[in-house]
Image: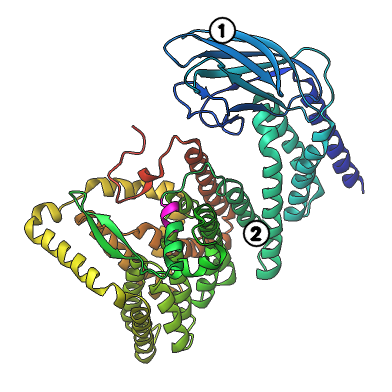
Amino acid sequence: MRRTAVLLATFAAGTLALLALDHAIGGFVMDADGWLDRPFFRDFGPFQEGYRIASPRSELVLVGLWPETAVDVGAAVASALPKGQDVEVLANGAVVLRSDVGGRYAVLRFTARTDAAGTLGLRFLAPRARAPEALRVSWVRVQRSGPGGWPWRRLPLFAAALGLAALGALWASGSTRLATVAVGVATLGLGAALWAARAPLVHWLPRAVACAAAGLVLAAGCAAALRWSRSAAVWWGAVMAFRFFLLPLPDLGSIDLTFHAHNIERFQRGEVLGSAVSDATGQPVFIPYPPALYAALSPFVPLADTSRGEAVVRWAMIALEGTVPLLVLLLMRAAGATERAAALAALAASVMPEGLLMVPKGIAANVAGSWLGLLAIWAVVARASPAVVAGAMALAYLGHPGSAASLAGLVVVWAVLAVRSGAETRQRAAVVVTAAAGGALVAWLLYYREVAGLTRESLGYWRGEAGRGPTSFFRARWVHVGKMAQDVVLKFGLGPFALAVAGLLGDLPPRLRALLQAWVVVAAGLAAFAVLTPFALRFEYFVAPALAMAAGVAADRAYARGRAVLVQAAWSIAFALQVAVGLWLHSGRLDPINLIIPSPRWPLVR
């Protein structure tokens, strides 16, 4: 009872302390920096060299101020045209200043008044300029000129943030003392953020609280449904909370999102889908592009609604990647791993940055094909009926051509290794291979026969390329080797990769050993193909689930030896890298094309 009272007192004191600090901070500066300024510089021009260009439709919206309070404002403004401009500044719709500026920045000073929510909207106009984009805005400084109102509207927000910290710590640990510590740490963190970046904190905190709450609900549901320990489930909840926060943001770029939205429309119109890759001279070469993803998403997208299609594709990638750890869990259990090893493998899959990177890379069909491929592999390892295996394989073949080829190779190599090691009988291996061939026949009848002629022409073209210039076609591509080394950190998260190596080198359950060995053999072959030829299938994405499974076995051994701290350190490193890479991508300083192996753009930082 005493500890509960201390927790409640800490919560109340923390909430009031944040409110008091919010009121006490007398001002702040909003810089045009190209990242943190995005929610506030609305409809301004793109960031360049320390400024954004204002137009008649743009507005600088400052949030997190004091309600109905007079403020002194200074804004660094310069002409964006070769000559000076007259400037008119509007604050919350009222003209507060008329002045003129030249090519150098001048600090325009004026007094304005915030609204009841503590918001100040500024517009910078050049009414007599011939060009609408006539002004550059570099920064705005706001200083309270009077006592100011108390931001009571933000009190529930602060309370929700601290309450969620307490609830999460209490649920994960069952310790009131740790919950009190969590509230204290959250108070200090929010206070520091208020002091350093007031407007961004106030803008993003509601979204952060909502996403953290969703992550906690997912973690609780996972612990209840899958019988995970709460300390394990909280990792998956934290990862999903961060992805819910970041990945749906429209200003987080996603390569080929429009391409996939147009493919949905093409599917709705009854067209046969295909795509093209470029050869060394930039000439397009046709490749098949199966329709499974677009068939699944088309009911949710009105015809020709590209914007809705892009949103649906983005959320489909988030959902599919978010459930990959559950497929890894099923695979581990089907392959004979312990319950704890399966859970730890799922955690390894969740903390790897690769799961987050798939949305910025925009390879939605790869994501769908890989997800369906994992489902098909589970059907194989779980010894499902031949009809189920054939159906699952057919769906996977209809997901993406690269993942389909990788899956077919994995099944064949698995059959050989499983029989050789005694993990499966010859009869079962033959049944699986036959079912896989049956799935391929179904996929042929449904799609591939429609593009067979064009596919043969493309293969013939590449054979001709190899014959005409074998020394340039078959050569070492060291940039791909460099990117593979980079992937160990930025895609596999370093910690899980180290555990995976330890897992592969140690003892494994017989059926899991056959599966992982086959997986590694196929991935190694794809990697060699990427290094020695122009073809670089996404083998690193293909091998990620296998690494997660091997990491789960090694983590289970570490727990058995009392070295759980090493496992927690591995998860922490990977999750920290996932957060860092995600924010780096969102900042615009990292182009996701630098992380894609077929792209020649490397090294990562120049």
Secondary structure beneath disc 2?
helix
Q: How is the image coloured?
A: rainbow
Between residue 51 and residue 170, name the one nearer to us.
51
> What amino acid does circle 2 point to?
Ala
**Which amino acid does the dot numbered 1 rest on?**
Asp
Front: mark 2 or 1: 1
Residue at 47% across, 80% down:
379
Residue 554, image x, y percentages: 49, 62
Numbered mark located on residue 233 in the image: 2
Q: Position of residue 182 (x, y in %)?
A: 74, 42
- Above or below 603: residue 553: below
Judging by the rendered image, the residue that carries numbered circle 1 is: 100
Q: Neighbour class for label 1 at 10 Å: few (<14), some, many (≥20)?
A: some
Please identify the quarter of the rendering in which residue 428 is found: bottom left
In the picture, which quadrant includes the C terminus?
Answer: top left
Mark 2 or mark 1, earlier in chain: 1
Classify 433 as above or below 36: below
- Whether residue 332 appears in magenta in the rendering, the answer is no
Residue positioned most to the left: 468
Magenta stretch, residue numbers: 256-260
Element type at mark 1: strand
In depth, the one of 135 and 385 nearer the eye is 135
